[in-house]
Image (tube, rainbow, N blue to C red):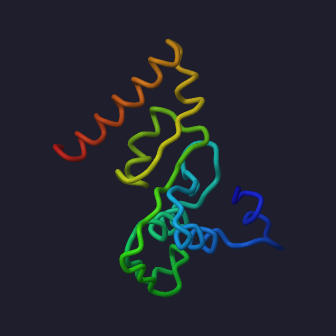
């Protein structure tokens, strides 16, 4: 949805405003851009969007496009969603970018597995568990 509204430089609504509106209205998830895969997205800007969606306090950080402190108090966060050309080999980068509280939609990355859909789904799950274990246990 936001690709139509916020990508054109001469009209529309900035993505950060859309993200805040969704959070204020009680939304539960929003595609934030992926950084890896086929969808464009600046890493720092995407991290700023993700923080805006789920952190209770976001300090000013102009490198991420955050121009003033934002205190969300007890307002619930929103899940960041990543999709678009992502597959099992992107898992380490996705976890480094988004952490544990995100939704990863592996469409073609699952469907395109040479051994079929079930093997693609299993590969995604195994990669996720291996990356989390490596991060937590070294």
* Quadrant where the image shows the N terminus: bottom right
Image-based side of 21 in relation to 14, left or right? left
* Residue 133 drawn above or below residue 95: above
Residue furthest right in the image: 10
Specify the quadrant of the image occupied by residue 76. Answer: bottom left
What residue lies at 64% left-to-right and 48% top-to-bottom? Answer: 39
Residue furthest left in the image: 137
Give the x, y percent position of residue 15: 64, 68
* Residue 74 drawn above or below residue 3: below
Image-based side of 101 in relation to 41, left or right? left
* Residue 119 drawn above or below residue 82: above
Taking depth in this image into account, of 129 and 78 the one nearest to the observer is: 78
Image-based side of 99 in relation to 112, left or right? left
Give the x, y percent position of residue 88: 45, 32
Residue furthest bottom in the image: 68
What residue lies at 56% left-to-right and 70% top-to-bottom? Answer: 25
* Quadrant where the image shows the C terminus: top left
Give the x, y percent position of residue 9: 79, 70
Taking depth in this image into account, of 56 and 108 the one nearest to the observer is: 56
Image-based side of 135 in relation to 31, left or right? left
* Residue 92 drawn above or below residue 98: above
């Amino acid at each position: 949805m936001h690709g139509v509204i916020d990508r054109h430089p001469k009209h529309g609504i900035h993505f950060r405003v859309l993200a805040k509106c969704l959070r204020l209205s009680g939304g539960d998830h929003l595609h934030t851009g992926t950084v890896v895969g086929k969808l464009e997205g600046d890493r720092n800007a995407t991290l700023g969007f993700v923080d805006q969606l789920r952190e209770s306090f976001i300090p000013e950080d102009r490198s991420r496009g955050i121009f003033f402190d934002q205190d969300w108090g007890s307002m619930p966060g929103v899940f960041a969603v990543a999709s678009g050309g992502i597959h099992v080999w992107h898992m380490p980068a996705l976890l480094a970018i988004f952490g544990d509280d995100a939704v990863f939609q592996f469409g073609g990355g699952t469907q395109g597995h040479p051994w079929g859909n079930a093997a693609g789904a299993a590969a995604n799950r195994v990669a996720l568990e291996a990356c989390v274990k490596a991060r937590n246990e070294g």
